[in-house]
Image: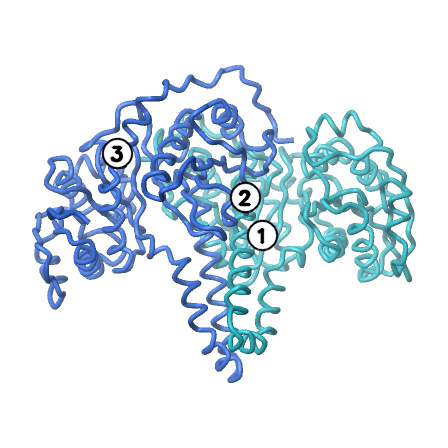
Chain colours: A cyan, B blue
Amino acid sequence: MADTKRRIAVDAMGGDHGPSVVVPGAVAGAQEQHIDLTLVGIPADIEAALKGVDRKDVDIAIVEATETIGMDEHPAQAVRRKRKNSINLAIQEVAEGRAAGMVSAGNSGAVMAAALMLVGRIPGIERPAIATYVPTAKARSLILDLGAVTDPKPSNMVQFARMGQVYAERVLELSHPTVGLLSNGEEPTKGNQLVQQVYPMLAAAEDINFIGNVEGKDVAMGAVDIVVTDGFTGNVLLKTAEGVITMLTDTLRREFTATLPRKLAALVLRPAFRSMRTSLDYSVIGGAPLLGVNGVVIISHGRSNALAIANAVGVAVRSDDHDLAGGIRERISLTPATPPATPDAPVAASSV
Amino acid sequence: MADTKRRIAVDAMGGDHGPSVVVPGAVAGAQEQHIDLTLVGIPADIEAALKGVDRKDVDIAIVEATETIGMDEHPAQAVRRKRKNSINLAIQEVAEGRAAGMVSAGNSGAVMAAALMLVGRIPGIERPAIATYVPTAKARSLILDLGAVTDPKPSNMVQFARMGQVYAERVLELSHPTVGLLSNGEEPTKGNQLVQQVYPMLAAAEDINFIGNVEGKDVAMGAVDIVVTDGFTGNVLLKTAEGVITMLTDTLRREFTATLPRKLAALVLRPAFRSMRTSLDYSVIGGAPLLGVNGVVIISHGRSNALAIANAVGVAVRSDDHDLAGGIRERISLTPATPPATPDAPVAASSV
């Protein structure tokens, strides 16, 4: 950890639970990370949420927002019309150098729109991507994009692979991380039209350790370090995994409390369950960096609990420690501009 | 079950394990369903696989195929060039009325291509879809498409909803089954461009009980009876769920055998595990019908074990019992042709 105290800005109004969950989570995260905190939002709400919270060793500044953006508002319009909303102002803290990074569990589209407007894209990056790592049977894999770009161009996805490499090398400390392209089959001929266009581009990129297509099951098995996909499919994959985990753990809980002998047996196994649940709990990861923008912008799940927010603060600190944005700037400056996909590239017109 | 003995044709050469798994599975399925069997493939391989198999009460006919189609062959080319392959000949049994349905665990693209060529589409159906039901926290949900059409047009997906309704009503015996559109958020504004075009079309269709967008987690929770999606995303969703289930059960097995007390406790819980595993095992479902073609065509997982093949034979029998193809023919004839999506429909150009 750094000796000089850094400051992370947190959108106190974000998430399904608002300040009552975000504020204590942010303070706990700041204590763990030995940093100071700027809480952005409606001061009275923040003050109320701070009551009774142990804030030892954390200097807390409050930046007043007079507006908030709802989860169902049109992102680009909202960040332009509501200039004094908590997301914009938290990113402004980063843009103007007062904070080393920001965290929001609010409208993720709005976080992205505000980041593009206020800190901007890294030169050469066409579209930023949301990246997170997930637990797998082997270790962890990084997945991107998770929803920043629902209809990417092929060249966007090649950049996702490069940004993912920087993340995997710097934060996950992997050397030569492998890259897989999410598809509906392993064969190079499989995929929708987008995937069939991206495949040869990844295969041709000498700086990318591309191992081919991966299927949904391969992701859980940890077949690759980095999974590249469009934001729509990535979002579906992540939420499907979440849903299946919830369904399974709920089913097991019900089965294991059905009879007294089972209850007793389950008691013995409780530590095993706890370790499994912890390794799979998204709140342990906490936040997903928006890669490709000029600053540390961390997007947290709308359903984040206090632990998730605390850990998102940790993700912000590590993203800054490892200078993710600088790494991406460097990597992209070293690679030639991606050639546009040949218009007459042999893309199968049909899936048959 | 019917009094007169029906016959199901099975592609004996399909699947990762070939005749040694498919043949005993098919015979077991035929016994359970009280039907007769036509095994299509290389006779010597079939005869070898039949050795020692109890074939009591099942009349087995063998149809000779001189060629097979590999999992990585180009489907449309393979079914046209290799006319005497086991997939084509099994579908031919259906096309010419000698079998009430067919099952293949082979190259699914080839099964679809052969079905289109040999039994053809139901009038009015633009593209067939592969549908399967999956266990959810509540009951079961039907998902389609799972890979027949990786880049559907919006109107294809409206037809998927209607074909799904027929399946849910006839096979799952649900009245007014609900339909959800798989997306990256619940709000009507969420989705990739395709989903944003399909949403208003489903909302406007008076014969479809459309409840809006559903996310990956909602599918596992059983939020809707029918999940409509493109074949690429549906395939990723299904395989991700499979991968997560495998990962979780492997982790639990490891944790539960780590110490002697845990092993003993796990012994008590074994029935609970078994019931959970059974409810989640894809082989219990066995096969996914190709909806929209003029006949019963069941696609099984490439990794199918004998139980999965036996159950796929059951799916074929039930699809015939409930006259799925007839139901779809009737439903589509009652609905007006889907108007093409208005070219200037207000589709958000960006996901922000």
Q: Nearer the viewer, residue B182 or B169?
A: B169
Q: Residue at x 38, y 30 (%)?
A: B162
Badge 2 local density, few (<14 within 10 Å), some, or many (20+)?
many
Q: Which residue is mark 1?
A: A142
User: What chain is tagged by disc 1?
Assistant: A
Cα–Cα span, label 2 and label 1 = 11 Å
Q: Which residue is mark 2?
A: A234
Is A325 situated left or right of A34 in this image? left
Q: Amino acid at mark 2?
A: Gly
Is A233 situated left or right of B283 in this image? right
Cα–Cα span, label 3 and label 1 = 43 Å
* Secondary structure of the residue carrying numbered label 3: helix
Q: Nearer the viewer, mark 3 or mark 2?
A: 3
* Secondary structure of the residue carrying numbered label 1: strand
* Secondary structure of the residue carrying numbered label 2: helix
Quadrant containing the C terminus of chain A is: top left
Q: Residue at x 28, y 32 (%)?
A: B327
Mark 2 or mark 1: which comes first in sequence?
Answer: 1
User: What chain is tagged by disc 3?
Assistant: B
Quadrant containing the N terminus of chain A is: bottom right
User: What chain is tagged by disc 2?
Assistant: A
User: For residue B325, which numbered disc appears in the image?
Assistant: 3
Q: Residue at x 47, y 27 (%)?
A: B202
User: Tag count in the figure?
Assistant: 3
Residue A47 to residue A125: above or below? below
